[in-house]
Image (cartoon, rainbow, N blue to C red):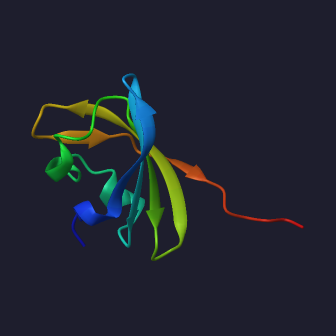
């Protein structure tokens, strides 16, 4: 699939950065590819954090914006959020 702006929502933040949630059926390996978030380059800033929720697998990862040239956005590989319950 491709990036869909309707899946991106700002959760909070201030002048130092924002926290976003992005929901998609795309796997993290697709979402963390440079250029995936280009259509939202005007909203995302370096060091913003995005909670990426994969509705297909289901899994969640935290990524941060590493660079934004104004047209090309690159995010980190992602840190998986463990979704297990051992009890």
Relative to 77, residue 56 above or below: below
Q: Residue furthest right?
A: 87
Residue depicted at 38% across the width and 73% down the height: 25
Q: Residue furthest top?
A: 16
Give the position of the N terminus as an image quadrant.
bottom left
Relative to 59, residue 43 above or below: above
The percent position of residue 29, horizontal first and vertical second, equals 37, 58
The percent position of residue 22, horizontal first and vertical second, equals 39, 57
Residue depicted at 27% across the width and 51% down the height: 33
Of the pair 79 and 41, the residue shown nearer to us: 41
Give the position of the C terminus as an image quadrant.
bottom right
Indicate left or right for 68 with 60 as reference.
left
Residue depicted at 40% across the width and 22% down the height: 16
Relative to 87, residue 51 above or below: above
Residue depicted at 41% across the width and 45% down the height: 77
Instruction: Count all numbered tags in the image, as a single digit.
Output: 0
The percent position of residue 47, horizontal first and vertical second, equals 37, 29
Indicate left or right for 15 with 39 as reference.
right
Q: Toward which corner of the image does residue 70 lie, by quadrant?
A: top left
Q: Toward which corner of the image does residue 73 lie, by quadrant?
A: top left
Q: Residue furthest bottom?
A: 56
């Amino acid at each position: 699939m491709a990036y869909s702006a309707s899946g991106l929502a700002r959760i909070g933040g201030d002048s130092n950065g924002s926290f976003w949630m992005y929901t998609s059926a795309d796997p993290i390996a697709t979402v963390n590819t440079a250029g995936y978030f280009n259509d939202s380059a005007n909203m995302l800033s370096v060091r913003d954090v995005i909670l990426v929720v994969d509705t297909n697998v289901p899994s969640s990862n935290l990524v941060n914006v590493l660079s934004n040239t104004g047209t090309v956005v690159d995010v980190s590989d992602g840190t998986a959020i463990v979704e297990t319950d051992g009890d």
